[in-house]
Amino acid sequence: MQGEELDLSAIVKDVQMRKSISVRKFWDTLFSFVALGFLILGLFVLLLLVFQLFVDGREKLASLGFYFSFPAPSAEEAGILSAWVGSIFVIMVTVLFSIPIGVAAGIYLEEYAKTSSSQFVRFLTDFIEINITNLAGVPSIVYGLLGLEIFKETLKLGNSVLTAGMTLGILVLPVIVVTTREALKSVPSALKEGSIAIGASKWQTIWDLILPASIGSILTGVIVSVSRAIGETAPLITVGALTFIAFLPPLPFSPRLEVNVDTGEAFQVGNYGPFDWLFSGYTVMPIQMFDWVGRPSPDFRVNAAAAGVVLVLMTLALNSAAIFLRIYFRKRIKW
Amino acid sequence: MTNTALSLPQIRKLIQRQNVFDQFVVLALLAAALSSVIVTAGILYILISESVSFFSQVPLGEFFNLVDPKWTPLFDDKNFAIITLISSTLVTTGVSVAIGIPMGTIIAIYLSEFATEQVREWVKPILELLAGVPSVVFGYFALQTVTPFMQRIVLGVQMFFAPGRDEFDYYQLPGFNMLSAGIVMGISIIPLISSISEDAMRAVPKQMREGSFAVGATRLQTSFNVVLPAAISGIIASYILGISRSLGQTMIVAVAAGTQPIYTWNPLDGAATISTFIVEVAKGDIEHGSLEYNTIFVAGLALVAMTLAMNLLGHYLSKRVREVY
């Protein structure tokens, strides 16, 4: 009698436990399906976004004239020539401005500050580190306010390629510093020790061994920040980039033309200097797109969509390049 | 072959020269590292100095007016109640967070605890690509795709609960509204939240998971009861970054959420956020040093103050709830 009762409760317990296990397994499976659903939704949004742009802008994308004509008052004639050329010029300034400073700051923080015995240097490094973390959280439009006040108004650089490039350069600086540090961190210390052991100075070690070993990862970070800078719109609007631009920045040493008011003939009045393009007016891809999106006439939406496709392709190309480069360098590492 | 053997003094001289060079290099590198401090100081300086000249012309009571808030700095009848812009900034951020945080967290848990290595290898680059889409393109998407979709949903919901009326008798979602902009903002911060959260979860030691599995917990129970609490400070950091990004997000709201500064807490309305206002003013010509010029800096200061408050709150929270293991 007694034995049977015990068995019964054991069976009940067993059933309960089985039930609890199957309930928990059910939740487990349900969660993984929901999460997978969210992931697919995210992917779907990306596809939908690109697809919608393609469909909306297909007429313009098919016509070659769109890529090689200036913005115009009528949607049919308007193109993106000054926008994509301007983007290239501005990004060139951004890269030339931010890479040397960003990489140098990364090297200092990773290779010098960490090993310093001075209390003051330690304190300074902590301070700089907190600072860089905070800068990464500052809204991009605030960098635009900085560019407006410092570069445009105080330094009187006006609404130029130089102002835009340096504003974006400051914006991407934290990203470059952080990725440089990550890249340097991954170089094994045996390499450094070997170099120091045969009498190389610290800088020789960095320049000849550590930098070449980590150049791939640094490059990846640079490409990612360039792709961010290319799509950045708000800071450039803030520095005053939203204007009608139907000319290209002058190439170095290209002939400077002037038009005779009476006859309408163009004649050459010397050549442009090597740096005149820096002070030229400009427009860039995302601003051109923003301008067209904001127009009340629906005709311009077609142009906006087409410009969007070009812009997305530019950033996708850069990001894919960064991803491939990372995989390539990861495979090539020999230690 | 030349004789490469050097005498001792020659070697000493060589070393000395190298050492001097090294010291110059260190100074140059230090200067570069200090540039970030200069940038921060510069940002604070311009925001505060322009705001000081703003407050010399506008009384504080007007700026913090909550009773009859209006923001009309470009009109003849000027009003400067910043709450007008703050309300819409908070509404769009709220919608964005309501979408971005749950989805980002769930995707992070899935990638870290459930997905196979292969799935992760495929998904992470795709999320990175999503993160790389320029915000102005997201703005176009919000205006042209999400808004018409939401308009149909809002209409459909009303027809379901109160059927039988003429279509135009129902409430119509305006073409510019904070809801659509907020939803797209939320989607745009998913990659940021999921990738940082996932990194934090993957850093939790394997033994903790194994201990949990050993006592019979499922992956889901382990994720929520063991991994999530252990990784909480990293996860909170990702939320804070996502919220800061939403607060400062400009192009999506400037394109899709409307440009009129209206005091409203209703996400179905269209209203200008702080950053939209800055863009709208900067689009036109403003005279350097004028009151209009000052207002965009005071708006920028409000924005920075909000993100700073978020950061401090996040820092405090992650210290309070952190589990030390």
Image: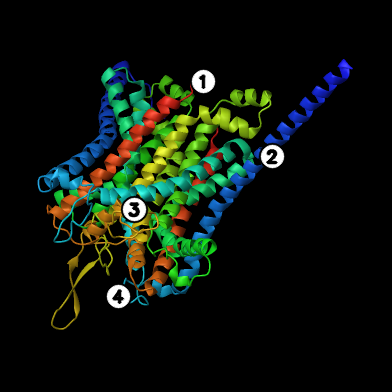
Q: Quadrant of residue B71?
A: bottom left
In the rendered structure, the answer to whether residue A69 lies left or right of residue A17 reads left
Looking at the picture, which amino acid does disc 2 mark?
A: Phe
Residue at 39 percent of width and 67 percent of height:
A304
Q: Residues within 10 Å of mark 1 (few under 14, many from 20)?
A: few
Labelled pair 1, 2 in contact (Cβ < 8 Å): no
Residue A73 image label: 4
Q: Distance between the residues labelled 1 and 4?
A: 64 Å
Dot 1 or dot 3, earlier in sequence: 3
Q: Mark 3 points at which residue?
A: B250
Residue A216 image label: none
Residue B325 image label: 1
In the rendered image, residue B139, in percent from the top left (x then y), is placed at 40, 58
Please indicate, yes or no, whether residue A65 appears anywhere in the rendered image: yes
Looking at the picture, which amino acid does disc 4 mark?
A: Pro
Q: Mark 2 points at which residue?
A: A26
Closer to the eye: label 1 or 4: 1
